[in-house]
Amino acid sequence: MTMIFGVPLAVFMGQLTLGLVNGAFYALLSLGLAVIFGLLKIVNFAHGAQYMLGAFAALLGFRYLGINYWLALILVPLVVGGFGMLMERFLLRRIAHLDHLYGLLLTFGLALIFEGTLVNFFGVSGARYTTPEALQGGMNLGFMFLPTYRAWVLVAALTMCLFTWFMIERTRLGAYLRAGTENSQLMQAFGVNVPLLITLTYGFGVALAAFAGVLAAPLYPVSPTMGSSLLIVVFAVVVIGGMGSILGAILTGLGMGVIEGLTKVYYPEASNTVIFLVMILVLMLRPAGLFGKEA
Amino acid sequence: MNTAEAYEANEATDTHSLEMLRVQDLHAFYGESHILHGVNFNVKRGELVTLLGRNGAGRSTTLKSIMNMVGRRTGSIVINGNETLHMKPHHIPRLGIGYCPEERGIFASLDVHENLLLPPTVRSGGMSLDEIYGMFPNLYERRKSQGTRLSGGEQQMLAMARILRTGARLLLLDEITEGLAPVIVQKLAEVLVQLKERGMTIVLVEQNFRFAAPLADRHFVMDHGQIVEEISAAQLPSRREHLNTMLGV
């Protein structure tokens, strides 16, 4: 059997895939956080809860309305994103002129309310969301067994990341967003409806989280707390990548997933902390993050 | 009827109205500080006027107040027949106004071409990209560069160029010659002459009086948040010495 540094190839590749899949979630979530932070300057602590809402919406939509996975993949981000826009319009906008810390507190409070409410109705144990039939099973690649759903998650998440990158870096709307991030007052003076741009941006960031939630539903137990445990890691990823670039958020997300996955192979005890160790190192060497712009 | 249509209708029916901008008893506040104390002036269509004065006299604040970029304003600002005091900031430029801020406001995350295309079109009849690149050949050569990698002069030209594309007919230009080499200041003067020939109305906040004097139809001197004097181009030669003492040059 082929060995890589004393580990069977199949185990190595298996963990690598697992790491990439986790990394894809980190990338999607940190991307949304970075987009929101860029324009609203709010650290969106509700991001994990919005990811969880995405997974729950998929689960409940299937259970009560018979909405299948593929439809959920489109509908849920729209619904949860729309809900996010309402949050921005009626709550976040009211405190936009205050210190950014208030935005953090408000979103954190909202996250607790969402989680608490769902715990009240569904408990914390979590429910299973059945993998859609077309994506069940797996492929034998010879050196490892690749579950189809994980491969799909990787492809779907990366496609969404690239779509987001394209929207922001290559379209006119994206140019508004980038410019608004730098100087929103001047954008208003050019006639751009910045408040609307802010609402749409927040909604888009939330929709990304909800999309990740739907992708995650068949993979992890759908429970009200599934987001809060993930969010801490995602914040570490954002700190490592820096707030400067969209591509940076994507690459850092994937990279951290892989590092975490490989740590599970070679030194499992550290797998939960390795990302935070990297974060400490990065903060010491490049305080603005790997892809961030030095202030 | 939205504001842009109101503007068009107004221009069509009101051809005898020559007034582009009328500012009356304008007070402006940043938080607790009262910056403008009753500013009064008007600008006719096709006119180029300057706001002169020492630093802190309230010239830039006057432009910002017109764009609704300050905290609180009272009084009246009529642009082409539309009272704008209670308009939202993003509706005001759609009356056909282009604003060029003192700090130029070139976006670092956009390249030169993107910076140029950024401001939305507010009216038809703006300059085409070819015309703009013809007027500013340097910008064409550097169109792929990051906006803030340009020299100060090139950035200033970019800040001017991008509002010419939008079809704005009233330009508010804040200190466009500040810190620039004489050859570039000369170029900007030529540009302003061309814009005037195109019928643009221009309000120029200027420190460099030698630059502004031959271009302007009228000069408004500001002090302590008020217009203290109006000097026409014809009066200028006789008032020059007086003006120099007032401006402290």
Image (cartoon, rainbow, N blue to C red):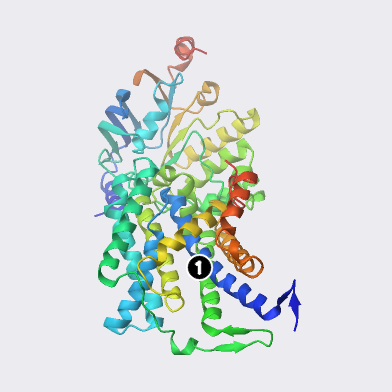
Q: Position of residue A116 (x, y in %)?
A: 29, 62
Mark 1 Cα-neighbour bin, 10 Å: few <14, some 14–19, many ≥20: many
Does the rendering let one see residue B146?
no
**Residue lying farthest to the front in this orientation:** A269
Q: Is residue A172 above or below residue B33?
A: below
Q: Which residue is mark 1?
A: A25
Q: Residue at x 49, y 88 (%)?
A: A136
> Can see residue B115?
yes
Question: The C terminus of chain A lies in which quarter of the figure?
Answer: top right
The quadrant of the rendering that contains the N terminus of chain A is bottom right
For the residue pair A100 and A263, the one nearer the viewer reads as A263
A157 lies left or right of A268: left
- x, y (%) of residue B88? 30, 45
Compared with residue A295, is residue A53 higher up or lower down, i.e. above or below? below
Q: Position of residue A40 (x, y in %)?
A: 41, 50
Which residue occupies 45% across, 30% down?
B204
Instruction: Give the secondary structure at mark 1.
Output: helix
Residue drawn at (61%, 54%) of the image: A278
Residue type at mark 1?
A: Phe
Residue positioned 33% across, 73% down in the render: A57
Towards the viewer: B79 or B103: B103
Which chain does the residue under circle 1 lie in? A
Left or right: residue A47 compared with residue A277:
left
Choose between A83 and A174: the one closer to the eye.
Answer: A83
In this picture, residue B226 sits left or right of residue A287 = left
Residue B135's x, y, as percent?
59, 45
Residue B186 vertical placement versus B220 (above, below): below
Count of labels shown? 1
